[in-house]
Image (cartoon, helix red, strand yellow):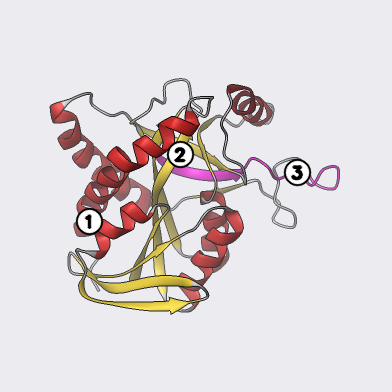
Amino acid sequence: MGTTAILSALAQEQQGLIEQLDARRQVHRAGRDYWLGRLHGRDVVLALSRIGKVAAATTATTLVEAFGARRIVFTGVAGGLGRDVHIGDVVVADRFVQHDMDASPLFPRFEIPLYGRSSFPCDADLSERLARACRTSLTVAGATGRMPGLHRGLIVSGDQFVSTAHSASRIQSALQTVGLEPLAVEMEGAAVAQVCHDYGIAFAAVRTISDRSDEASATDFPHFVTHVASRYARAIIDELMPLLPQG
């Protein structure tokens, strides 16, 4: 079934996975480090997306072209937008939209020029497997404290770190005018979804909510990344890998 690429937004997430790789080897390409090996008996390649849509698209393209990835799973953090999405919750995306795409009046706002669409769906089967992995791992995480919520829906991406309630409200309101209800906002996923659409390969993504996209984000984000996000990501991937086809 081909190689699974595990794309991480954070070095802390990737490091824990690298340490688990069997027969691991490192390849440096286009300014990035890629780690190849076996994880839970599956062929994998690990990479960091870097920050922003262009960097993420470059990494995703390299995963397909140079390393033969047949599916990409993305783990990372995001700011919460949905009313019931709280810090510590997890969102499994069902589709992505670029909230800063605006080629109007040539094309409708949010629509990707020449694609005739604004959203790119995630693979339904792979996303369901990812959600199952999340449910199992979050049940364990919640055994000693608050049970993290699991949400599924729209995640939006843009080349900005959303750090004020006003900015978050403005993004949310603009999307709602075209019938879109975002659960979370981040900076890479929509670009990877578009690359996977172009190549016809499966894509799934999970984002742990590190902050509420408000004035506290600058302090909530680094604390959460250090103490929570990387632990969640490793636990989710550990549960996901045995659910994937071998080969």
Numbered disc in front, either 1 or 3: 3
Q: Identify which residue is drawn at 82% across, 43% down.
A: 104
Q: Which mark is residue 243?
A: 1
Q: Which mark is residue 102?
A: 3
In this figure, which residue is indicated by the disc labeled 2?
78
| Any part of residue 2 in sight | no
Which class describes the residues within 10 Å of circle 2: few (<14), some (14-19), or many (20+)? many
Q: Secondary structure at mark 2?
A: strand
Could you tell me how far apart the alpha carbons at marks 2 and 3 are, in whole angstroms? 22 Å
Q: How far across and how far down the image is residue 182, in percent? A: 54, 32
Residue type at mark 2 is Ala
Question: Which badge, 1 or 3, comes first in the chain's sequence?
Answer: 3
Residue type at mark 1 is Leu
Q: Identify which residue is drawn at 41% across, 61% down.
A: 72
Horizontally, is 55 left or right of 20 in the view?
A: right
Q: Secondary structure at mark 1?
A: helix
